[in-house]
Image (cartoon, rainbow, N blue to C red):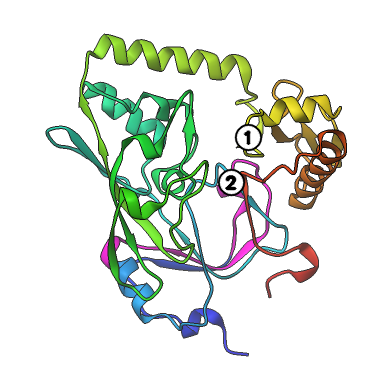
Amino acid sequence: MRRLVDRLPTVRGTYTENAPLAKHTWLRVGGCAEVLFEPADTQDLLDFMADKPTCVAVTVIGVASNLLIRDGGIPGVTIRLGRAFSEIDFSDSEVRVEAGALDIEVARAALANGRRGLEFLIGVPGTIGGALRMNAGAYGSEIADIMIEAEAIDCIGGYQRISHQQMGFNYRQTAISNGWIFIAARFSAVAGEITEIKARMDEIRAEREASQPIRTRTGGSTFANPDGAKAWQLIDQAGCRGLRIGGAQVSEKHCNFLINTGTASAADIEALGEEVRRRVAADSGVDLRWEIQRVGVAADQEVQ
């Protein structure tokens, strides 16, 4: 059988076959990418999307802070947006940020430039691309509050500008096709007092440190909050705090976080999450929705 990499267009970035992905994820689990593509720049990515065979599946990852890659890996091409997509440029009352920039670095840059409104990003793990995809938020703010316009590449290599209205923002969701790849966005970034900006960021950091298991192998909040309720409270009420399957555990500190205690497989973590969902549904009738994105195939379907 012809190898997938031999069917892909020539690029200026790099292709890696059977690339281990666990090392790129915060949970430190998961299988290999059939082919990992790290584009050299936006034009390289545009050309790849325009020229690749239409039947080849594409999955996009950043730093995989809110991502569970299954043990069998990811078929097709996994695109990783890294440092080549991390520019942060301020103008009069805005900032344009590329999708590979870390949320925390955007918050720090805003502080250094005396811009307010982006402080909450200091408490959001991951990259701007992922934050756009899931309307990430924390501590009373979310991406929908600051986004002016997004830029994306569609599934056939077309460049798209997306207005705030077109994003269709909802709680931890947007209406944009999963086949489109966010490459940048413009955010409101008006002038503010540096001392006030810093104080708010310090407050967020302290609250996060006190309430979340941030020094463990975790993927952030596992489930979205249902209407009028807190996921962690429903999980706690259902008796799941500290629950374990294999090497995966519900955090004792914040039970909407699942932890890899060191030996977990992706299957352990997903099974634990499904058991939590089952127990919460039995206890309160609430069907928790996964906030962590799950991609790839199970170990028995391992990518060849």
Q: Reply yes or no: does residue 55 show up in magenta.
A: no
> Among all residues in the image, which is located at the extreme left?
92
Marks 1/2: CA distance?
23 Å
Which mark sits nearer the N-terminus, 1 or 2? 2
Q: Which mark is residue 25?
A: 2
Type of residue at label 1? Asn
Say which quarter of the image contains residue 278. top right
Type of residue at label 2? Thr
Find disc 1 in the rendering and name its residue: 225
Q: Reply yes or no: does residue 37 show up in magenta.
A: yes
Q: Nearer the viewer, mark 1 or mark 2?
A: 1
Give the residue drawn at x 75%, y 63%: 298
Give the residue drawn at x 30%, y 71%: 158
Say which quarter of the image contains residue 120. top left
Task: Give the extent of the magenta segment.
Answer: 19-43
Mark 2 falls on what kind of element? loop
Asked whether the viewer can see residue 247, the reply is no
> Among all residues in the image, which is located at the extreme bottom?
1
**Quadrant of the frame with the C terminus:** bottom right
How crowded pointer 1 is (Cα within 10 Å; few <14, some 14-19, many 20+) is rated as: many
| Nearer to us in this view, 108 or 35 | 108
Residue 249 x %, y %: 79, 34
**Quadrant of the frame with the N terminus:** bottom right
